[in-house]
Image (cartoon, rainbow, N blue to C red):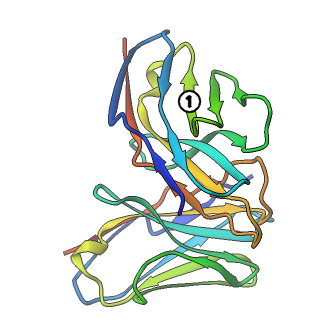
Amino acid sequence: AQKITQTQPGMFVQEKEAVTLDCTYDTSDPSYGLFWYKQPSSGEMIFLIYQGSYDQQNATEGRYSLNFQKARKSANLVISASQLGDSAMYFCAMRDDRGGGSEKLVFGKGTKLTVNP
Amino acid sequence: KAGVTQTPRYLIKTRGQQVTLSCSPISGHRSVSWYQQTPGQGLQFLFEYFSETQRNKGNFPGRFSGRQFSNSRSEMNVSTLELGDSALYLCASSLGVRGSYGYTFGSGTRLTVV
């Protein structure tokens, strides 16, 4: 069974600094996708970045980058130059990409990020 | 392009009642997935519909059911509500083909059972 572990319940960072949010995963499937989502207090889940298990390079999207270490089964999110608007819950999620076509996501418990001015 | 629309946004129900939540996906999207979010259990997968067929189902009791219509809109129903069903219910829509794109979520329906 797939499992996502986010060990940091809360993180604090100063505005304009970089922060790393940890995510480790457990799966026996060779093909999977990893996602990061942001959830502000309004409740909506906002997609940030995706990494496929066969991707050779780490994914980047603007200020977000994913530090993918396949052997360690980790997919940490790095946010550069933090902004006050980055304060939110952040969720790491995995999708099993074996046959069947299902797009079910398995989520971690999340990390609450607070950006201080 | 309109996003994913979930209605209602808030709902208060009494134990034992039933409730129906609605999710209208992005135009052209054929897949809708439902998730339950609670402080204790986090985000848990309920079910997924693609082209009116249930493609996957999570580990929830039979009181939770869903369906998808020909226009891809989806509804989920919870019968005989329990206090523990109080949660934020989120739906996500997609084209239905796995890719490197992220799934678009609605703002959710916050259900309170009293």
Residue at 75 percent of width and 52 percent of height: B1
**Lateral position of residue B70 relative to residue A3, left or right:** right
Residue at 40 percent of width and 85 percent of height: B61
**Lateral position of residue B82 relative to residue B74, left or right:** left
Q: Is A108 located above or below residue A11 in the figure? A: below
Q: Nearer the viewer, residue B91 or A2?
A: A2
Give coordinates of residue B85: x percent, y percent.
31, 74
Q: In which quarter of the image is the C terminus of chain B?
A: bottom left
Residue farthest toward the left in the current orientation of the protein = B114
Q: On what subunit does the disc labeled 1 rest?
A: A
Residue at 77 percent of width and 59 percent of height: B98
Q: Which of B10 and A114 is in front in this view?
A: A114
Which residue in the protein does label 1 denote?
A77
Q: SS of the residue at dot 1?
A: strand
Give coordinates of residue A51: x percent, y percent.
70, 40
Q: Is B55 located above or below residue A39 in the figure? A: below
Q: Which amino acid does label 1 sit on?
A: Leu
Q: In which quarter of the image is residue B39?
A: bottom left
Residue at 75 percent of width and 69 percent of height: A101
**Lateral position of residue B62 relative to residue B114, left or right:** right
Give coordinates of residue B84: x percent, y percent.
25, 73
Q: Is B83 located above or below residue B108 in the figure? A: below
